[in-house]
């Protein structure tokens, strides 16, 4: 990063204001994480979370930035909004009306989709909040934790649901404020802030465990350096693109000759992002989560025992298989080669050596399938690598591959937006060699 680029940020009052606004909103989010919901004993709750770190609750706690383990007003974090957004994307595939809104209605249609997503977020929050309140009341029988809820009953459930709904709506609003008045995608930055805030605690626990188990300090330092190298490798791969050349034929519009341009269609190696490991983790941890609330089904306990520890071969085989499946599934939802081929044909564009229309669709689909396969293997390797390293060389690395993928993706997006803002004002970019570009 060039030193002059940092100075340029201070020279632009508008950019400085956007950055200060972004950091202020993120600070408000971190303050809200520490405001507890009434009626819960924090010490009993901490003991409960120590016993369920390998469940779906632990995954939700990561996305809430630690708000769930404190049972704060932001306990559910932004997960209900993410779930509602994914559901809306899936519904656009099966519902012609929603697909028409998204593609043909323009800004008005997208505004309606956003409104439906907000309604879905509130509904999901109500369901999850009520289930969480009832689940905490049953904790003494299920997990051996005494007195998590001070005064169980409908009053506690109602207060909990109202508080969590208000907290989730507030997080949604904070994210939208960052997107509109700050720099970057607000929802992504809120998730990023929660993960980054957990790094010091996770690092401290790792060193404490390593010292308690008598792990060689050389191995510990070597693992940390290796994970740093993995972080650099993730940045390298995430910037990778497969650029399909596109040519536009010359055509006469009025009295002007237009077209004749050469460009490319960039296809990312990791088109699905972090959605596949999130879905895969949720499915594998779901049986373990159910057993926390009902211990009266022996078969369910047996199934949960198979997937309760992420260092077993069976768990990781299923984990990798689900990641590969969801990579193909989600890529098929968010990227439609048929639409790309039709748009190119309508605009007079073509791929050299490929006929427009169906042949172009088949070619793009073939390239995308190959990329998705390698991308799914890459995501799988990143997600299971910390477990493999921990099982061979030392104590458990509590910081998983999913967190690394999210951090790298959000950080690269943030730097790209900052870079574009500086260059658009004719200032030197963040990188000395100029604009951040995808790696071909």
Image (cartoon, rainbow, N blue to C red):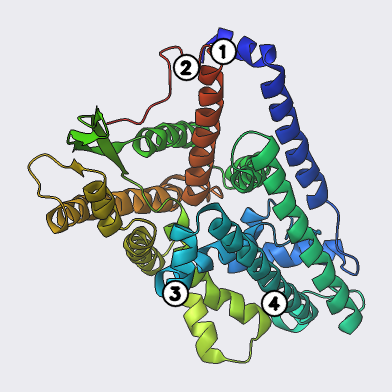
Q: Position of residue 94 (x, y in %)?
A: 41, 74
- Give the CA separation, mark 4 to mark 3: 24 Å
Q: Is residue 105 left or right of residue 259?
A: right
Q: Nearer the viewer, residue 339 or 427?
A: 339
Q: How would you rate the neighbour count of disc 2 (Cα within 10 Å): few for under 14, some for 14-19, many for 20 or more?
A: some
- Give the CA separation, mark 1 to mark 3: 47 Å
Residue at left offset 74%, top offset 72%: 129
Q: Which residue is farthest left?
A: 353
Residue at left offset 31%, top offset 58%: 336
Earlier residue among tags 1 and 3: 1
Q: Nearer the viewer, residue 178 or 383?
A: 178
Residue at left offset 23%, top offset 52%: 341
Q: How would you rate the neighbour count of disc 1 (Cα within 10 Å): few for under 14, some for 14-19, many for 20 or more?
A: some
Quadrant (top left/top right/bottom left/bottom right) for the C terminus: top left
Earlier residue among tags 3 and 2: 3
Earlier residue among tags 1 and 4: 1
- Count of numbered marks: 4
Q: Is residue 260 left or right of residue 419?
A: left
- Give the CA separation, mark 1 to mark 4: 47 Å
State the mark number for residue 5: 1
- Secondary element at tag 2: loop
State the mark number for residue 333: none
Q: What residue is shown with label 2?
A: 431
Q: Which quadrant of the figure has residue 81? A: bottom right
- Secondary element at tag 1: helix
Q: Is residue 364 left or right of residue 309?
A: left
Q: Position of residue 195 (x, y in %)?
A: 62, 45
Q: Position of residue 75 (x, y in %)?
A: 74, 60
Residue at left offset 46%, top offset 32%: 228
Q: Which residue is farthest front?
A: 255
Q: What residue is shown with label 4?
A: 127
């Amino acid at each position: 990063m060039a030193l002059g680029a940092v100075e340029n940020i201070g020279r632009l009052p508008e950019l400085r204001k956007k950055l200060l606004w972004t950091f202020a909103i993120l600070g408000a989010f971190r303050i809200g994480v520490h405001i507890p919901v009434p009626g819960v004993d924090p010490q009993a709750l901490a003991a409960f979370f120590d016993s369920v770190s390998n469940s779906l609750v632990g995954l939700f706690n990561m996305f809430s930035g630690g708000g769930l383990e404190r049972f704060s007003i932001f306990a559910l974090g932004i997960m209900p909004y993410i779930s509602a957004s994914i559901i809306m994307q899936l519904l656009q595939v099966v519902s012609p009306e929603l697909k028409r809104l998204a593609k043909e209605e323009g800004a008005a249609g997208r505004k309606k989709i956003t409104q439906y997503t907000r309604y879905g977020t509130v509904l999901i929050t109500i369901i999850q909040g009520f289930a969480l309140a009832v689940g905490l009341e049953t904790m003494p029988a299920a997990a051996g934790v005494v007195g998590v809820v001070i005064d169980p009953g409908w009053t506690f459930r109602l207060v909990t649901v109202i508080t969590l709904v208000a907290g989730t709506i507030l997080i949604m609003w904070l994210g939208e404020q960052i997107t509109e008045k700050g720099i970057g995608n607000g929802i992504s930055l809120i998730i990023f802030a929660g993960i980054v805030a957990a790094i010091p605690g996770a690092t401290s626990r790792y060193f404490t465990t390593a010292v308690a188990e008598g792990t060689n300090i050389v191995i510990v330092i070597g693992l940390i350096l290796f994970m740093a190298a993995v972080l650099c490798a993730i940045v390298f791969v995430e910037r990778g693109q497969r650029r399909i050349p596109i040519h536009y034929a010359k055509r006469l519009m009025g009295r002007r000759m237009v077209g004749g341009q050469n460009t490319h269609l960039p296809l990312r190696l990791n088109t699905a992002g972090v959605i596949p490991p999130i879905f895969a983790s949720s499915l594998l941890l779901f049986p373990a989560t159910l057993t926390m609330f009902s211990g009266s089904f022996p078969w369910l306990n047996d199934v949960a025992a198979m997937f309760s520890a992420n260092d077993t071969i069976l768990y990781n085989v299923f984990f990798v298989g689900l990641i590969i499946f969801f990579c193909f599934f989600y890529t098929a939802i968010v990227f439609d080669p048929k639409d790309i081929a039709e748009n190119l044909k309508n605009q007079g564009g073509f791929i050299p050596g490929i006929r427009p229309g169906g042949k172009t669709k088949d070619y793009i689909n073939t390239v995308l399938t190959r990329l998705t396969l390698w991308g799914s293997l890459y995501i799988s390797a990143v997600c299971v690598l910390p477990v493999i390293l921990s099982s061979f060389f030392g104590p458990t690395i509590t910081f998983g591959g999913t967190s690394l993928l999210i951090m790298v993706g959000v950080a690269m997006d943030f730097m790209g937006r900052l870079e574009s803002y500086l260059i658009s004002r004719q200032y030197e970019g963040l990188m000395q060699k100029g604009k951040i570009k995808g790696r071909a």
